[in-house]
Image (cartoon, rainbow, N blue to C red):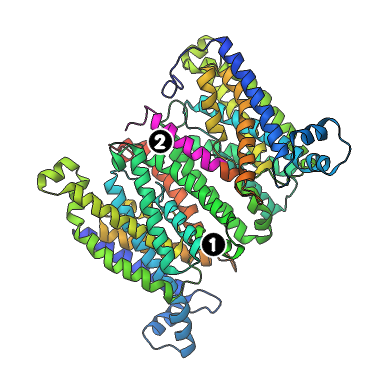
Amino acid sequence: MAMVTTVSARETGRPARVLALAGVLAALAVVVVLSIALGSNQLSVGQVLHALFAYDGTYADVVVRDTRLPRTVLGIAAGMALGLAGALLQSVTRNPIADPGLLGINHGAAVMIVFASAVFGVTSPAVAVWFAFAGSLGATALVYAIGGGRGAASPMRLALAGIAVQATFVGLNQAMQVIDTHALDQMRFWLVGSLANRDLGTLTGLVPFFVAGVVMALLLGRALNAIALGDDAAHGLGANPALIRLASVVAVGLLAGSATAACGPIAFVGLMVPHLVRFVAGQDERWVLGLSVLAAPVVLLGCDVLGRLLASPAELQVGIVTDVIGGIVFVLLIRSLKAVSK
Amino acid sequence: MTRRVVAVVACLVLVAFGFAVLSIGTGDYALAPGEVLATLAGQGSKADYLIVTEQRLPRVLVAALVGVALALSGAVFQTLSRNPLGSPDIIGFTAGSATGGVATIIVFGAGTVTVALGAVVGGLLTALLVAALCGPRGLRSDRLVLIGVGVGTVLVGVNSYLLTRSTLEAASQAVTWQVGSLAGRDWGYVWPVAAVVCLLAPVLFGYARPLRMLEMGDETAIGIGVDVDRVRRVLFVLAVALTAVAVAAAGPIPFVALAAPQLVKRLTRQPGPNLLASAVMGALLVLAADYLGQRLLDASLLPVGVVTSALGGAYLAWFLLLGRRRPAALASR
């Protein structure tokens, strides 16, 4: 069974899930307000609400509309994409430590974006996202091929395949930056993973990729439940496991590609969130996906706010904060895994 | 040593020397290999002599010494953890040494000795932390690799955080250092590394026999009369110190410690850690990577860490594919 090793396979009742949904929505609202209020200019909750609902052009209103709001919207979208991609990967690979960042998929997208910029001079995100999509699909295929493919590959093998692929991509990225120092300057902050100073206008080209990925992922819930029973049972239920896996990989490519094109390779959000969600949602993939899509923005925005507070008056890129927090969660997770013996 | 081991070591030394000569000849002022050899023998022109001894030779020496240190520590850790992937770069000790180094650069400013001390302390603390997190069996745990990866990620993030808290000058210095680079290494870098390697490597070679016994399992080693606990502690400290010195001199160059002992194992077809051959292989890998980094792209110098990162990732992927065909290669106890 898919995640029996990490979470006891208790069946969770509907009331608990509805309660969790309400809790996640409330947390999202709180984090959004914090993300708009906190930064080098601290704003009060009153100012935030004023800017959102009674905009009249005061300085605080402009700060909110021009920098904080776009950043928050970007964080919500990127969080949704990363959380869904992680939940899909964990379900398809039946591996509790699958994550688009840890498996090198985000870095695959990043390599192609840097390549497009260094070789073809592509700077528009709307064009770069095609390269990102190709890169994330290629990286997924590569990790799959090296790390053991379908079925329950051991967490160790998959993680190591991810490390290998990621190290190669990071090296290639750095090499390309050395060749093209102009690209280096533009890419340096983006490559760490950051929500700051992204112009939402230029990111509209990513929206179709993002929306297609989210819709595909949310529709796959029932099918993933079927293949969790094993391929034979899935066939019996009228599902086509090969097609479902292919669709999931394409959705992961769309989600990881658009998230990386927008804010760089960010790891561990896709790892942490589905695990947190499974504690309350149990094993039903429809609920896991549905709650992940709402909980992941809470984690990503929370990390972003933390980065602004920790390093103020400067700020720490969100990718660094997720690395630290995610790394700690990862270690705790490994310690609790029964599949990896002591 | 069997005849095959002797032959392998001789070949590795020759190839490493070849890369060293090529590397010395590379730069804005290019020298043919013949000219390099003549200059080293004291028969070149005065200008050649100055360029070779003042600029190129120290860099090559640092590369070779760092390679030796990394490979030895990789061989020791792979034996102690009884895991072919238990090398210091995979399990986060290299990142921990870098954290110590970056912290000292920022707090005390850069100086070879202080950075080296910081790197040693950082590496030791990280090693202890990882061992504690792995549980009762410590570094022999199956979880070692994954926990080490997690700890390494956290430390890389911590390094980035430290950089934001520092002055621009210290930060740019620390950033270059963090990739793993040999650019601008002069005699001031050679002496500390040379001293430590020349001091620790013979001690380590003295432990070659107990190390081979450990490879066969603790019970067997105890049966033969090895004081397992003491040997483990000594080897642990020696290996951490070697990693830290290498990191202090050239930054955290990835994958050399992982690959060198494993490549040697395949070449010599001998079980157990082969310290001498591994050390030469490490020197060869760093020299070759540094040469490639200087030569691969016209007019742009790739830091050596970038080259080993790209090549090492490919090597690890190949290693995993190999293990898939023969699961025994990856099996750890």
Specify the label residue A232 is tagged with.
Answer: none
Q: What residue sits 42% from the left and 30% below the top? A: A153
Q: Please give the chain letter of the residue carrying mark 2.
A: A
Residue count near mark 2 (Cα–Cα under 10 Å), binned few <14, some 14–19, many ≥20 = some
User: Measured from the top left, where is residue B316 in percent x and y?
Assistant: 42, 46
What residue span does the magenta drawing correspond to? A322-342
Q: What residue sits 48% from the left and 45% below the top? A: B153
Quadrant (top left/top right/bottom left/bottom right) for the N terminus of chain A: top left
Cα gap from disc 2 to disc 1, whole angstroms: 31 Å
Q: What residue sits 72% from the left and 43% below the top? A: A42
Q: Is residue A332 magenta?
A: yes
Q: Residue A289: tell me if it is visible.
A: yes
Indicate left or right for B108 with A55 as reference. left
Indicate left or right for A100 with B127 as reference. right
Q: Which residue is mark 2?
A: A156
User: Measured from the top left, where is residue B144 in percent x and y?
Assistant: 36, 40
Identify whether A172 is placed above or below B200. Answer: above
User: Measured from the top left, where is residue A327 in percent x and y?
Assistant: 49, 40
Label 1: element kind: helix
**Callout 1 amino acid:** Thr
Specify the label residue B176 is tagged with.
Answer: 1
Q: Residue A216: tell me if it is visible.
A: no
| Magenta portion: prevailing SS class | helix
Identify whether A195 is placed above or below A99. Answer: below
Q: Is residue A86 magenta?
A: no
* Residue in front for this viewpoint, B113 or A5: B113
User: Measured from the top left, where is residue B297 in percent x and y?
Assistant: 57, 64
Q: Please give the chain letter of the residue carrying mark 1.
A: B
Quarter of the rendering containing residue A267: top right
**Callout 2 amino acid:** Met
Identify whether A273 is placed above or below B53. Answer: above
